[in-house]
Each structure stands twice: as structure tokens, then as C-alpha cells.
Image: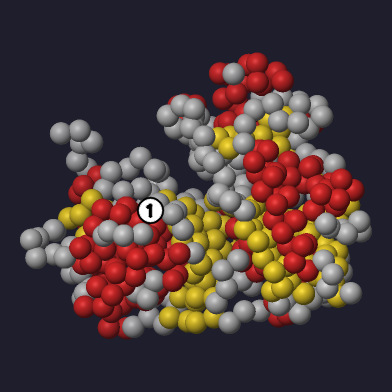
């Protein structure tokens, strides 16, 4: 029976599993139903950990039912969203819902820390700026505002190590998912006493840190029985979904960046050193899933959400039909020279979801598709603006691998290439976190000599969109006017 590697992508919305053979070919995939977001109070975003666990089991069962007689699933590895917190008792059972990275209950606490200069030492130690949704402020908030839950919490899981515990019985996590908790020393890959003190806990309440690519443990017999996995199946320690995506795309050295374009946009590159003196202040630093590498990233906020908002306002029909109509209408739209859109959420210097924005320079002859193009161009301006700090710091940017919904647009990748002057690569695959996790599984089982040979085996085709020099010159001029408009609008009072 042929061996197979299973990559699990446990995201914020759903769980996906993709099974690969040792030649890197996809054998089967399964996707769970979307999780339910619960908002018991304004700004709070929670999920039921049992719903996520059931989704993982359902995906495992569906995949094994398709290929169990043909392939032996020896290794499983997970790419998991990071930043969410699950308080648990001494037995590892949840005592509170999963508080997601989208949760904003700690905003006032974070503001207080920022005013007190806490970020001045937290960011160099953890690699991360202070964000309301990360585990560090969330744990501190529980201690201050919900002492009963805090007292009942004998262990604090990220989603990654909770699922690891359910699969294997081991309380193990990896550097990149732990880094997203903002409780790890970015230099030593160990829990930082000072960060734990700020949160109000002892490191003993956190999972054991082990390298990505190491076998975490055997899958428990009851899980094998419930899902159809073979009794010999093992779990290989995975990583943050962005890190696994970068691995799958071959982004393992400085140069090419990952540009993830969903509702929110994030770009991620690689550094060979965690020293902040070499990294722009705008970037956050985390561990790569490969050793002796770190990821540098910046969130640009909800740039994708802005286009989705406008399409919902201006077009009718189901979602796919609206996007198809936009693509047809944009064929006749020229680049905008005087119509600008300021993102409703996020931007080059602030990933906030509470910013105001809108159109500037709007005239009666502007069509809905011209307004949509202005939104796409604003994303290009914001990306170029953010990348300036990266280039000025001496970090190479040789290309951008664009993944997510925006990569499917016939126009947006070219707009980004022309706004930034950087080639845009559009890989012909859609499950990069799972692919990267499968690569890690193969490395952990010793099936590949090194990451480079594994990536060569799993390589997928890609299309490259090259900047058009004429349009790049055009966008340099319009980008300058866009920036002046942004500065001018931000100088206005928030209330008139």
C-alpha cells in the first residue's frame, strides 16, 4: 500500500484537509462546514472549540473513507490559525469558548499599555506589536475582568495545541503558533518570563515548545477508530498557517514575499536573523516553520473587505455572479487619474477595523466599475507604501506570490504589479497551508532529504504578471497624489 501525507488547514472559518502522495500529487480533499462566530457582546468574537474539533474529525473521516484501501496515511501535520486563546482545566477540557484573534475586548487594556510604553519592550522581546486579539492581552484581560474563568484556567491553549492534545494526548505546540500568542522570546524560542508576568501567569500553564517538523505523538486509538486512520498514524508538529503557506510556496529565504489576499491582506517575507535592528518597525516578527529562519509580516487590514463591500452595494445576484459582472464591466475601464478610494479598514500603517474611508474625486460620470477599480488601485498604493519601509531597510523584494480571492481577478494582480513595480506570481493551487503542512509531515518522517528537495517534489505551476513600465510610471504620479489625499483626510476631525 502506497504511503500518503495529510495536511490539515485549521483556519478561522473552516477546516480543510488535503491528502498527497509522495510525488506531491493531490489524492483527496475535504472541507468542513463553516464554524459559527458568537458575539455575546459588541466587539467580542468567540467560537465553540467542540465545533472545531468535530470539523477536524469529519474531515479526517471523509478523507480516509475515500482512500483507505489504496493509501496508508502515515503522517499528519497541521497548519493552524494563530492568536486565538482557549482556557482549559487541569484535564485539558475547555472552561470557556475559544476567544478568537478577531476579538476586541482587550482594546482598552492595550491602549493603556501603549500609553504606558509597554510596547517599547514587548515588541523587541516577542517580535509582535500589541494587538487586542492576541493571547497576551486576552489572558491579562481575563485575570482583570473575569476572575472566575481565570481561576478555573489551569492551562492556556492556542487552537493548535488544543487540537494536538485532542489528537495525541500531548500538550505540545510549535514556535510559530506559540509566537502568535505573544508569550515567546523571539530570540530563544522559549516562553518569556517577562511576557508571562505581564499576562499574569506562570509558563507552566502553557504547552511544551517543540520544533516544527518533529513527531508530536501517535494519534490516539479512539481517534483512529472514529476516523478510520491507521493505528500507526502519527502527528508531526506543524505551524502557523501563514508560515506553512510560505513553506508550501517555497518562500524559505529572503527575497520573494507571500501576499495573502483575503478579507484582510497580509504580506510575509523571510529573515535569517531575529535582530530587530535589521527589520522595519512596521513589521511583526515570528518564527518560520523551518529552523534558523523567521517570518516578517505586516497586516494591511481589510483591503479585500472594501471591494467586497462595494460589490455588495452596487451589484445584484449571488456572490459569484456579482464578481463575474464586475470582471466583464471592468474591461472598458481605464486607470483612474483623479478618483481615489481610502480603505474603509486598514492600510499601510494601521490594520484597524474601525477606520473611516471613502471615495475622493468622485464625479457624476464615474461608473460603478470605475469605482471598483479605484478600490483595487488603493490596495496597490497601500501595498507599495508599506513595502517602501522594507526596501529602505535593505530587505530584498524580488517578487510577490499572491494567494487568496484577489489573485483570481483578471485585473487586480496587474494593478498590484504596476503600482509596486514588482512581478506578481499567481500559483496554480488553492490549498497552500495544507500543502506546506504536508511538506513538514514528509520532512518529519524523514521521507525527504531536505526542504529544497521536498519543495521540488511538491512544486506547482505558476503564472507571473510582469509590471508594465508605462503603467508603472503612471501609478508613481497618481500614488503621490493618493498619499497627499490620505494625509489631508486624516488631518480632519473625526466628527464634524
Circle 1 sits on which residue? 305
Q: Is residue 307 above or below residue 36?
A: below
**Picture quarter containing residue 155?**
top right
Residue 319, image x, y percentages: 37, 60
Residue 359 makes an appearance in the image: yes
Find numbered disc 1 in the image and state the secondary structure of the residue it sits on: helix
Q: Is residue 284 left or right of residue 447?
A: left
Count of marks, rendered view? 1
The reply, left or right, for residue 265 in relation to residue 55 is left
Residue sitting at x 35%, y 40%: 354
- Image quadrant holding the N terminus, namely bottom right
Q: Which residue is nearer to you in this view: 414 or 392?
A: 414
From the viewer's side, name the closer residue of 408 and 143.
408
Task: Work out whether 398 lies above or below 392.
Answer: below
Residue found 65% across the figure and 44% down from its top? 52
Tell me if mark 1 has few (under 14), some (14-19) or many (20+) residues whose alpha carbon lies within 10 angstroms of its own: some
Which percent across, then down, holds residue 266? 49, 57
In the rendered image, which quarter is residue 368 located in?
bottom left
Q: Residue at x 73, y 50 (%)?
A: 57
Where is residue 130 shown, x and y percent of the image? 52, 38
Q: In this orientation, which residue lies closer to the viewer: 177 or 120?
A: 177
Give the residue drawn at x 56%, y 63%: 269
Residue placed farthest to the top in the image?
148
Residue 7 spot, x, y in % from top left:
71, 62
Amino acid at each position: 500500500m502506497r504511503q500518503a501525507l495529510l495536511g490539515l488547514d485549521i483556519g478561522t472559518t473552516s477546516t480543510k484537509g488535503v491528502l498527497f502522495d509522495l510525488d506531491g500529487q493531490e489524492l483527496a480533499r475535504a472541507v468542513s462546514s463553516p464554524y459559527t462566530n458568537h458575539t455575546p457582546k459588541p466587539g467580542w468574537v468567540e467560537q465553540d472549540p467542540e465545533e472545531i474539533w468535530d470539523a477536524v474529525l469529519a474531515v479526517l473521516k471523509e478523507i480516509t473513507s475515500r482512500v483507505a484501501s489504496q493509501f496508508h496515511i502515515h503522517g499528519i501535520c497541521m497548519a493552524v490559525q494563530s492568536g486565538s486563546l482557549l482556557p482549559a482545566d487541569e484535564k485539558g477540557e475547555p472552561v470557556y469558548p475559544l476567544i478568537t484573534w478577531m476579538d476586541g475586548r482587550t482594546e482598552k487594556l492595550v491602549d493603556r499599555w501603549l500609553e504606558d510604553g509597554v510596547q517599547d519592550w514587548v515588541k523587541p522581546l516577542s517580535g509582535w506589536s500589541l494587538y487586542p486579539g492576541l493571547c497576551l492581552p486576552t489572558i491579562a484581560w481575563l485575570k482583570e475582568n473575569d476572575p472566575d474563568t481565570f481561576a478555573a484556567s489551569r492551562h492556556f491553549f492556542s487552537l493548535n495545541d488544543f487540537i494536538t492534545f485532542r489528537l495525541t494526548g500531548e500538550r505540545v505546540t510549535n514556535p510559530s503558533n506559540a509566537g502568535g500568542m505573544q508569550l515567546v522570546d523571539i530570540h530563544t524560542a522559549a516562553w518569556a518570563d517577562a511576557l508571562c508576568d505581564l499576562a499574569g501567569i506562570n509558563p507552566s500553564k502553557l504547552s511544551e515548545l517543540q520544533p516544527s517538523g518533529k513527531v508530536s505523538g501517535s494519534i490516539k486509538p479512539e481517534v483512529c477508530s472514529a476516523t478510520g486512520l491507521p493505528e500507526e498514524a502519527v502527528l508531526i508538529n506543524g505551524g502557523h498557517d501563514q508560515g506553512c503557506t510560505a513553506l508550501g510556496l517555497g518562500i524559505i529565504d529572503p527575497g520573494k514575499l507571500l501576499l495573502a489576499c483575503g478579507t484582510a491582506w497580509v504580506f510575509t517575507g523571510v529573515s535569517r536573523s531575529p535582530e530587530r535592528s535589521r527589520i522595519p518597525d512596521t513589521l511583526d516578527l515570528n518564527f518560520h516553520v523551518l529552523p534558523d529562519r523567521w517570518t516578517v509580516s505586516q497586516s494591511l487590514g481589510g483591503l479585500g473587505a472594501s471591494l467586497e463591500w462595494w460589490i455588495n452595494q452596487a451589484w445584484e445576484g449571488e456572490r459569484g455572479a456579482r464578481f463575474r459582472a464586475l470582471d466583464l464591466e471592468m474591461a472598458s475601464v481605464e486607470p483612474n487619474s483623479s478618483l481615489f478610494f481610502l480603505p474603509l479598514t486598514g492600510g499601510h500603517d494601521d490594520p484597524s477595523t474601525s477606520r473611516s474611508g471613502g471615495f475622493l474625486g468622485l464625479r457624476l460620470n464615474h461608473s460603478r466599475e470605475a469605482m471598483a477599480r479605484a478600490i483595487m488601485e488603493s490596495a496597490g498604493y497601500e501595498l507599495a507604501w508599506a513595502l517602501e519601509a522594507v526596501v529602505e531597510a535593505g530587505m530584498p523584494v524580488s517578487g510577490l506570490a499572491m494567494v487568496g480571492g484577489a489573485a483570481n481577478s483578471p485585473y487586480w494582480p496587474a494593478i498590484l504589479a504596476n503600482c509596486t513595480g514588482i512581478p506578481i506570481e499567481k500559483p496554480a493551487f488553492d490549498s497552500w497551508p495544507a500543502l506546506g503542512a504536508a511538506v513538514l509531515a514528509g520532512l518529519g518522517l524523514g521521507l525527504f532529504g531536505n526542504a529544497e528537495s521536498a519543495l521540488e517534489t511538491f512544486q506547482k505551476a505558476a503564472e507571473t504578471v510582469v509590471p508594465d513600465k508605462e503603467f508603472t510610471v503612471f501609478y508613481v504620479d497618481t500614488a503621490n497624489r493618493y498619499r497627499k489625499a490620505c494625509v489631508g483626510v486624516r488631518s480632519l476631525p473625526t466628527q464634524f
